[in-house]
């Protein structure tokens, strides 16, 4: 049951990715490890990324580590759940005492990645497949995963390897929803990174006047 799939994922990883609780139970009963590791992480990473909260609970009960770091960017399951906006998965990990401020290989916490999760989503508009098409951007709605993290005590002024706060990170990806959430919870507009930039400076650098105005407190 631990034999790896050709793409380096074991059976329990694949079952966790699919949210196959009965299969996960059977594999655990046959000796599979809830801590099995591959490049993309543990089975808990797979379940978190795909939003399978009940599978996550099974794996945690079997000893899965909520703070395991994947070889892929050193993400934790909480990073994965936040990036994919899986709210119940985030709740499961918070209840399991996951490290809210765990850092990936760039020093970014799950809250840093929250802005990315709530950036406008690109939608390709085709009149005919294979022909030139338009692109529109879809609002992903309120940054609820970020709110869950903040309610649980995530550090709003955490710094990544370049000195960026989550507010800088949200500005970098044009996440109005992320910026709004962080400002509503008291994020410091004037915080500077190692390059001396504020989040507003970053927004202006990328040509995002609306976010820059919000960050400067302009009407």
Image: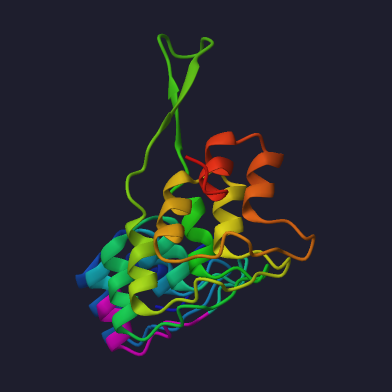
Colouring method of the image: rainbow
Please state which of residues 190 and 50 is positioned toward the viewer in this rendering: 190
Please state which of residues 213 and 197 is positioned toward the viewer in this rendering: 213
Name the spot of residue 80 as percent of width and height, x first.
45, 64
* Residue at position x 38%, y 83% in the image: 32
Please state which of residues 186 and 88 is positioned toward the viewer in this rendering: 186
Seen from this angle, which residue lies furthest right? 195
Q: Which residues are magenta?
A: 56-68
Please state which of residues 96 and 203 is positioned toward the viewer in this rendering: 203
* Location of residue 217 with respect to 87 vertically, above or below: above
Name the spot of residue 17 as percent of width and height, x first.
36, 62
* Residue at position x 59%, y 75% in the image: 103
Name the quadrant containing residue 8. bottom right
Seen from this angle, which residue lies furthest front? 219
Q: Quadrant of the N terminus?
A: bottom left
* Residue at position x 42%, y 9% in the image: 128
Residue 14 lies within the magenta run: no
One can see residue 43 in this view: yes
Q: Give the side of residue 127 with respect to residue 207, left or right.
A: left
* Location of residue 173 with respect to 147 vertically, above or below: above
One can see residue 10 in this view: no
* Location of residue 160 with respect to 51 vertically, above or below: below
Name the spot of residue 33 as percent of width and height, x first.
40, 85
Residue 64 lies within the magenta run: yes
* Residue at position x 61%, y 57% in the image: 168
Q: How many marks?
A: 0
Q: Give the side of residue 28 with respect to residue 149, left or right.
A: left
């Amino acid at each position: 049951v631990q034999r790896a799939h050709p793409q380096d994922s074991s059976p329990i990883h694949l079952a966790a990715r699919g949210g196959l609780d009965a299969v996960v139970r059977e594999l655990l009963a046959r000796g599979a490890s809830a801590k099995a590791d591959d490049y993309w992480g543990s089975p808990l990473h797979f379940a978190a990324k795909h939003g399978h909260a009940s599978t996550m609970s099974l794996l945690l009960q079997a000893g899965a580590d909520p703070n395991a770091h994947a070889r892929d960017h050193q993400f934790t399951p909480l990073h994965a759940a936040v990036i994919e906006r899986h709210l119940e998965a985030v709740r499961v990990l918070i209840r399991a005492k996951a490290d809210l401020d765990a850092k990936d290989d760039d020093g970014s916490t799950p809250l840093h990645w929250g802005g990315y999760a709530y950036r406008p989503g690109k939608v390709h508009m085709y009149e005919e497949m294979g022909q030139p098409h338009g692109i529109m951007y879809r609002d992903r709605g309120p940054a609820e995963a970020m709110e869950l993290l903040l309610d649980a005590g995530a550090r709003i002024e955490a710094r990544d390897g370049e000195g960026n706060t989550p507010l800088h990170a949200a500005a970098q990806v044009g996440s109005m929803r992320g910026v709004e959430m962080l400002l509503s919870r008291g994020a410091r507009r004037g915080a500077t990174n190692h390059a001396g930039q504020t989040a507003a400076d970053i927004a202006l650098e990328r040509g995002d006047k609306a976010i820059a105005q919000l960050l400067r407190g302009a009407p």
